[in-house]
Image: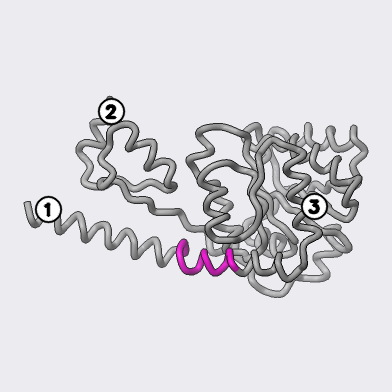
């Protein structure tokens, strides 16, 4: 009841993903009252310099095709499926390495699963300060986003998506709905079914075996799309226009 009261009283409502607009329309909010305004990323996460070869060796990335997941490792991320995908990939593409960077309540469980399956293609790195993570992500061959299958996650976009697009690295998006649609629209990588080890392994192998030029094009496409559609300056312009439209409506009243 409180939400409906707020929606009725609002001149405009902004949401951060198209699925949220659809959900509000289903709840009776007029479509012309709702604007989609995507989030942007923290500029401190972006690193577009040449990869640091010394750091590549120091972290254990050297000689591997590194698919990197960075961030919280909890129940929502459902990363057991990625560990299972690593087990499948170890047999077919031993040079592919899955790298997990960060912390969370599931880290110990994921490490235990990796050890139990004797996985040599999984690497865990501790959480890094914000000012360091961009440099590390820049070393990735592919950046991975994974969330469990859930109707809520289908209508939202994980915040790391914008950062990964801005980084200019190919993306493997294992999230259903709006996040996958955004990566496809940007032509910034591949999407696959979440919580499906077979689908994740297949996408990883496809990225590994495709021509390097094609992967680099994915990264370039993502960075260009971010700069042209999602950067902070574009969000400011969008909100400025929104405020002007609202002010004009009130003047006419």
Q: Which of marks 3 and 1 is nearer the N terminus?
A: 3
| Label 1–label 2 contact, CB within 8 A | no
Q: Mark 1 sits on what residue?
A: 250
For the residues marked 3 and 1, what is the alpha-carbon distance in whole angstroms?
Answer: 56 Å
For the residues marked 1 and 2, what is the alpha-carbon distance in whole angstroms?
Answer: 24 Å
SS class, disc 1: helix
Q: Which region is colored magenta?
A: 221-231
Q: Residues within 10 Å of mark 3 (few under 14, many from 20)?
A: some
For the residues marked 2 and 3, what is the alpha-carbon distance in whole angstroms?
Answer: 49 Å
Q: Mark 3 sits on what residue?
A: 205
Q: Mark 2 sits on what residue?
A: 2
Q: Comparing marks 2 and 3, which lies closer to the viewer?
A: 3
Q: Determine the image quadrant of residue 183.
A: bottom right
Q: Where is residue 83 in the image (x, y as percent from the top left)?
A: 79, 39
| Label 3–label 1 contact, CB within 8 A | no
Query: Which secondary structure type mostly characterizes the magenta part of the structure?
Result: helix
In the rendered image, the vertical position of residue 118 relative to residue 221, given as above or below:
above
Q: Which of marks 1 and 2 is nearer the N terminus?
A: 2
Q: Tell me what residue is drawn at x 67 percent, y 52 percent.
A: 172
SS class, disc 2: helix
In the rendered image, the vertical position of residue 19 relative to residue 116, given as above or below:
below
Q: Is residue 14 left or right of residue 179?
A: left
Q: Determine the image quadrant of residue 165.
A: bottom right
Q: Tell me what residue is drawn at x 58 percent, y 52 percent.
A: 160
Q: In which quarter of the image is the N terminus?
A: top left
SS class, disc 3: helix
Q: Does the magenta stretch include residue 252?
A: no
Q: Position of residue 217 (x, y in %)?
A: 66, 69
Q: Does the magenta stretch include residue 230?
A: yes
Q: Earlier in the sequence, mark 2 or mark 3?
A: 2
């Amino acid at each position: 009841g409180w939400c409906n009261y707020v929606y009725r009283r609002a001149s405009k409502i902004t949401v951060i993903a198209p699925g949220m607009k659809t959900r509000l329309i289903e709840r009776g909010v007029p479509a012309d009252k709702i604007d989609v305004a995507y989030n942007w990323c923290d500029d401190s996460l972006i690193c577009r310099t040449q990869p640091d070869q010394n750091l590549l060796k120091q972290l254990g990335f050297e000689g591997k095709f590194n698919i990197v997941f960075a961030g919280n490792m909890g129940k929502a991320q459902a990363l057991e499926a990625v560990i299972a995908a690593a087990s499948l990939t170890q047999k077919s593409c031993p040079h592919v390495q899955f790298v997990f960077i960060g912390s969370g309540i599931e880290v110990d469980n994921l490490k235990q699963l990796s050890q139990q399956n004797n996985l040599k293609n999984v690497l865990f790195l501790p959480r890094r300060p914000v000012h360091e993570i961009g440099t590390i992500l820049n070393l990735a061959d592919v950046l991975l986003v994974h969330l469990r299958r859930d109707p809520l996650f289908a209508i939202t976009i994980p915040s790391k998506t914008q950062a990964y697009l801005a980084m200019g690295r190919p993306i493997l998006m294992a999230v259903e709905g709006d996040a996958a649609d955004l990566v496809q629209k940007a032509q910034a990588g591949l999407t696959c079914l979440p919580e499906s080890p077979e689908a994740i392994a297949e996408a990883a192998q496809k990225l590994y075996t495709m021509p390097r030029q094609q992967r680099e094009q994915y990264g370039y496409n993502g960075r260009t799309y971010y700069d042209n559609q999602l950067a902070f300056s574009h969000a400011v312009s969008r909100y400025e226009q929104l405020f002007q439209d609202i002010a004009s409506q009130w003047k006419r009243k």
